[in-house]
Image (cartoon, rainbow, N blue to C red):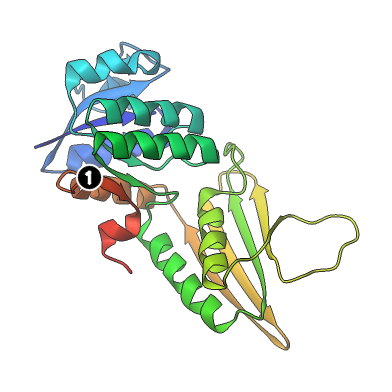
Amino acid sequence: MIKIAVTGACGKMGGLIIENVLRSKDMKLVSAIDINNIGRDIGEVMKIAKLNVAVDDANNIDAALDRTRPDVLIDFTIANAAARNVIVCANKKIKLVVGTTGFTPQQRSIMDEAIRMNRIAAVISPNFSIGVNVFWGLLSEAAAQLGDYDIEIIEAHHNQKKDAPSGTAMKAAQIISKTLGGKDLIYGRHGLSQRQKEIGIHAVRGGDIVGDHTVLFAGDGERIEIKHQAHSRQAFANGAVRAAQWVYTASSGIYEMKDVLGLK
């Protein structure tokens, strides 16, 4: 039985992940960590049956992990909190699934170093949807054939998402840029400027949009659009739990969701 801890347990993603953990025959929720509802049973917070797992204070995550001793921690929180959580888990030899986005290069460097130094396994991805990971692969193939086309990335999310552009959009830009040997990135446009051969990235925030990503390849007389739309956060929760099952038996290293799925 894989013992699971979930940070951001009282949030929308945290709750969905917990529901998926509870449905899994080879997993057991041992720790629910958040800054809200501390001391309350997480099942009652979620308005389901009592689970006998009290919400632990995220500000005292060390003690919570020492007491519950999870095998894998799943983190979908915010960058500052996740960066700290990763270091704490790495030092305690707890394997990781991290879907948080918005890390600074320095935060990501510190996280990676902690994981490598402690020789644990971690799956870190800006998107755990199976469809998005296929989407990224399609972008690489398209860019290889359409490198002389103008390329624009448009992403849309709900009005509560703090980081922009999304991690998924940034990953798409990095994949395309790498395929084409390196491209400048432009974040939105205003004023007077002539388009060069950069990749444009545009972010929309509004309502309850779960996550839309469109990459536009525009040439003379035609255009191709490759799009992924998430209808529900369940797509991300499914992938996160699948990653937790995979990382439990993985050797030490830093992996992406494509490794979990066996994609090239």
Q: Quadrant of the N terminus?
A: top left
Depth check: give the residue in front, 8 or 92. 92
Expressed as whole percent of the image width and height from the top left, the position of residue 62 reads 30, 16
Residue 47 visible in the snapshot: no
Residue matched to label 1: 252
Q: Quadrant of the C terminus?
A: bottom left
Which residue occupies 45% across, 65% down?
136
Which residue occupies 38% across, 18% down?
58
Expressed as whole percent of the image width and height from the top left, the position of residue 257 reads 33, 55
Residue 213 visible in the snapshot: yes
Residue 207, relative to residue 42: is it above or below? below
Which residue occupies 66% across, 50% down?
204
Q: Which residue ends up furthest to the front in the rendered image?
A: 117
Determine the image quadrant of residue 216. Answer: bottom right
Q: Tell whether 205 sits left or right of 243.
A: right
Expressed as whole percent of the image width and height from the top left, the position of residue 233 reads 41, 47
Q: Amino acid at mark 1?
A: Ser
Determine the image quadrant of residue 68. Answer: top left
